[in-house]
Image (cartoon, rainbow, N blue to C red):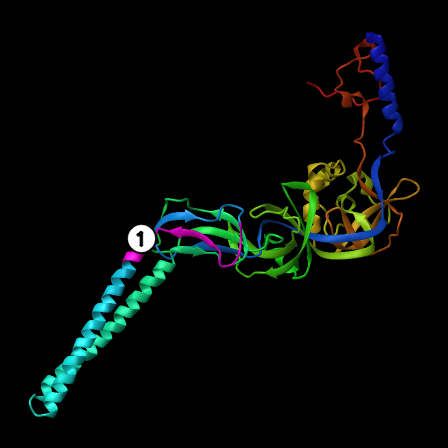
Amino acid sequence: MRRIAIVCLLVLVAACKGRGKNDQQYQTAKIDRGNVTETVTATGTVSAVTTVQIGSQVSGVISRLYADFNSHVTKGQLLAELDPTPFQAQVEQRQADLTKARVEVANAKVNYDRQARLAKAGLAPQADVDNAKAQYDGAAAQVQQSTAALSQALTNLRYTKIISPIDGVVVDRAYDVGQTVAASFQAPTLFQIAQDLTKMQVQADVDQSDIGRVQVGQTARFTVDAYPDEEFRGRISQIRLNATINQNVVSYPVIIEVPNPGERLRPKMTANVTIDVATVRDVLRVPNAALRFRPPESETKPATGTAAPTSTTGSAAPSFERGMARQRGMGGAAEALGAATQQRAPRKSQTIYLLDANKKLQPAQIRTGISDGRFTQIVDGNVKVGDTVVIGLATSKVEGPAAFGGGMGGPGGRPGGGGGTPPRGR
C-alpha cells in the first residue's frame, strides 16, 4: 500500500510539473454591454407620515380610558378622562366669586348714585362723590377679574377630557386608569396617533460624503428584517439640513415616501436603504476585479525596446504592493475591500489586462465611469464586446514536492520526483 501511495504521489507531481511554468492559469471574464447603476447605501427608520403626540395640559388622575393600542379613532373622539372633581369644585368657587363681585358692584353703584344726588343738592362734598365713584369702578373691575377666573376654571375642566385631533390609529398609550398625570412643567404624552398607515416614510441617515449625489425625486429601495426576501420601493421627497454628528460622523436625514397599502410596514422598523443615484444603460462594462488585477512581476517585464506599462498614478508600484498583487488574483477579503474603494474612485485612466489568442497578457488603457460595485462603465478605451479580460490568478504555481511539504522521500532517501525544488532545511 505504501508503494502505491508513493507511485500516485509521483504521478501527481509529474502532472503538475508537466504544466510548465510558462503555462500560467488565469481567471477571466468577458467585456460586455449592460446597465450600470451607482448606488448609495444608508440605514433608516420606518414611521408614519404624520404622527401626533397627545398630552394633557392639566394634572390629575386618569379615571377612564376609551381607546387602547391599535384602536382606530376619528377626529373629535373622546380618548380618556381625568377625574373632574377638583376642577368642578374650582369652577363652583369661581362662580361664587363672580356672584359676590356682581353684588359688590351693584352696591357700589347705589352708593355712588346717592352721593351724586347729595352733591347736586349741596348736601355732600365733592370728595365723597369721587370716593364713591372710585369704589364703583373698582367693583366693576373685580367683576371682570372674576369672570376671567371662571373662564379659566371652565377651560381646565374641559381639558380633563382628552380628545383626538385627527383620524388615525393609536400606536402608543403611556398611562392606565388610576395613574396620575403630572403636567407641572411640560405636557406628558398620553397617546401617539399615526394618521394614515397606508402611507409611510423612511428617514435614512446619509453620510456627508454621499449626500451630494442624492437628489429629491430619486428612487430608493430598502428591505426590513421582517420581510428579508422582499424589496420595497419609494421616492425621495425631502433632504433635510439638520445634520447629526455621531462619533465624528456627519449624516443628513433623507425622507423617503413609501406606499403601504397592505400595512405590512410598521412604525419603528429598521430599513436598509439603497438609493439609485446614477444609471447608464447599454454601455460597455468591465468587472471590477479586472481593475484591481495586477500580474506577477515576471509577467510584466518589458521586452527590449518596449516600455513597460505604468500604473494609473504614473509611478512604479512599491515593492509591497507588487507582492500583494499575487494575492489579489485569489479573491477573498482583498476583493471585498477593493469593491468598496473602487466605487468611490475618481474617474480616470486605468489599466486592465486582456488575454490574447496566444494566452499572453496585453495591457489596455481605459477610462472608467460609474460603478455598481460589481461592474464599472467603460467610457473610452481600445476594447470591445467579447474581449477576454483577466480578473485574477486561477491557481498558484506548483514547484515540485515542496508544495506538498517535502515529507515523503523516494528511493534512497532522496525527495521523490527528482528535479523539484529541494525542501528547506529544518
User: Outermost residue toward the top?
Assistant: 1
Which residue is nearer to you in this view: 202 or 162?
162
Residue 397 lies in what quarter of the image? top right
Q: Tell me if residue 65 comes above or below residue 16 in the rendering.
A: below
Residue 298 magenta = no
Kindly tell me whether residue 318 is visible in this rendering: no
What's the residue at 71%, 38% (across, down)? 324
Which residue is nearer to you in this view: 337 or 250?
250
Task: State the image coordinates of residue 201 (x, y, percent, origin top left).
Answer: 60, 54
Task: State the image coordinates of residue 341 (x, y, percent, origin top left).
Answer: 68, 48
Residue 77 magenta = yes
User: What segment is highlighted magenta in the picture?
Assistant: 72-89
Task: State the image coordinates of residue 415 (x, y, percent, origin top left).
Answer: 80, 15
Residue that label 1 marks: 85
Q: SS of the residue at dot 1? A: helix
Which residue is nearer to you in this view: 97 or 388?
97
Side (left or right) of 159 relative to 113: right
Side (left or right) of 244 relative to 121: right
Task: State the image coordinates of residue 380 (x, y, percent, origin top left).
Answer: 82, 57
Residue 149 lies in what quarter of the image? bottom left
Which residue is nearer to you in this view: 64 or 193?
64
In the picture, the quarter occupied by the C terminus is top right
In the rendered picture of this protein, how many numbered marks are placed on residues? 1
What's the residue at 35%, 60% (across, down)? 156
User: Outermost residue toward the right?
Assistant: 357
Q: Tell me if residue 324 comes above or below residue 148 in the rendering.
A: above
Q: Which amino acid does label 1 sit on?
A: Thr
Kindly tell me whether residue 139 is visible in this rendering: yes
User: How crowded is the residue under tag 1: few (<14 C-alpha within 10 Å), some, or many (20+)?
Assistant: few
In the picture, the quarter occupied by the N terminus is top right
